[in-house]
Amino acid sequence: MTAPDASHINRNFKSRVIEALEDQELRNNFRGAMDFLMQKRAAMFPDPEDLEALRHRGEQIRNRCLQQLPELLEKLESQCVNNGIRVHWAETAEQANNIILGIMKDHQATRMIKGKSMASEEIGLNHFLADHDIEALESDMGEYIVQLDHSTPSHIIMPAIHKNKQQIARLFHEKIPGIDYTEDVDQLIGTGRKVLRQKFFEADVGLSGVNFAIAETGTLCLVENEGNGRMSTTVPPVHIALCGIEKVVESLTDVPPLYRLLTRSATGQAITTYFNMISGPRKPDELDGPKEVHLVLLDNGRSRMYADKQLQQTLRCIRCGACMNHCPVYTKIGGHAYGSTYPGPIGQVVSPQIWGLDKAGSITQACSLNGACRDACPVNIPLPNLIRRLRHEGNIDSADSQTLGRGSLRKPVESLIWKFWTYLNSSPLWYRLTLWGATRFRNLMPSSIGPWTRYRSAPRPAEKSLHELVKAHQSQSPSHVIKPTKQETK
């Protein structure tokens, strides 16, 4: 099996958006959730000056680490190997899947328990392993809910945020044998834990993501609230950590400022329940922990982003999801409308660069360029600028760009319309003639103009142009000049 096909992102984008806009329950779920998250984040940063200082520091740390990325990755590999961690390099999603499958086969493993990992969603790992008769069970409660629903995450931090407790109660009642219907949140969480706890002990392999990989010490840092990450990385005999190459930081001192930004921006918490630091497999004198630890470093298009000085800023992302929480478009349509592993503003920048504009470029249009994502980003990624850049490259094949699928969104009819528009506005004669015709034959304006009139009234030119109105006003008004008084001229 090859890497997951992303062509559906462009193909069904409009229909997914329309479906989401017509789902009032979905819109209510997102509106309440986003308002709650924005309030919690605001409470964590009461002083705007302190917030800006911390954002600036986070930006500097990420920029410094990115500037040294090749060297830091080599240092990370060296330190991890010294610690007993086996390091694997995956240039593509397909390579990453095959590396993980190879580790599973080496241990005759048929069951995997997974902590939260958006990188595993990115490479389509669950479906890949299922095709090879390997069970991969999500242990993050939100991920478990969407997996049980045969769905995908709608948010990178809170995968099941699109569902309310009534929907989850029905799902558990229908999908888990012997479970009575209840809307009590504590009971629902208890049900999920009861199912998952046994799976931790039955699993042959545990898989996790990585929030920060420290090159100086060869340490893998994992941020979580539920304890499932700690169970996934310590109970099974083999632990596989899947990490995007951009997650590496230089030293341990770089982590606290980024951690502070991450937790406060993501869930409005001063600190998460668990902060795991993994530096190797179980030592001979230790009672628990995995016997083997594998680190899979995933590229999957990140090197292309790194090669472009402007688009390189994408790699600063610490995956907090704040840009989604503050995005008015995401709040209206939810994560599934994007059709991508990474939705929202960061998804509009990351997805086209991973899969190409020809497959994922359409989602760059799901942005009003209001700038809320830029203001919310804890590491100051200029998301609106990057979205504009990718929109432009979707229509213009620039030889200076390395973005896949550039120019693929260009439509011949639309190009002709804009050329005609340019000609009209550069020729005074044709501009005046067109303006005269538009005002005199205004009643012939069609009442339906594609998507524009689906939710808006059709525009209609005025009876007279502004030039004509000004000229008529001047002809009716007495000609005079206001002269300054002697005092005003001094």
Image: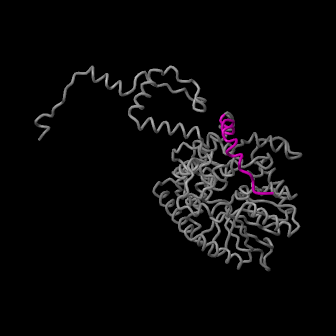
Task: State the scheme by which the image is colored.
Answer: one colour
Q: Is residue 325 above or below residue 452?
A: below
Is 400 included in the stretch rendered in magenta?
Answer: no
Task: Classify residue 194 as left or right of residue 376.
Answer: right
Indicate left or right for 303 with 208 as reference: left
The stretch of residues the image draws in magenta is 1-21
Q: Position of residue 200 (x, y in %)?
A: 82, 61
Give percent across and percent down for residue 405.
Answer: 63, 52
Q: If the image is split into quadrants, where does the C terminus sit?
A: top left
- Report the front residue among 423 and 174: 423
Q: Is residue 235 left or right of residue 484?
A: right
Say left or right for 39 vs 355: left
Q: Nearer the viewer, residue 94 or 75?
A: 94
Q: How many marks?
A: 0
Residue 10 part of the magenta segment? yes
Q: Is residue 94 above or below residue 392?
A: below
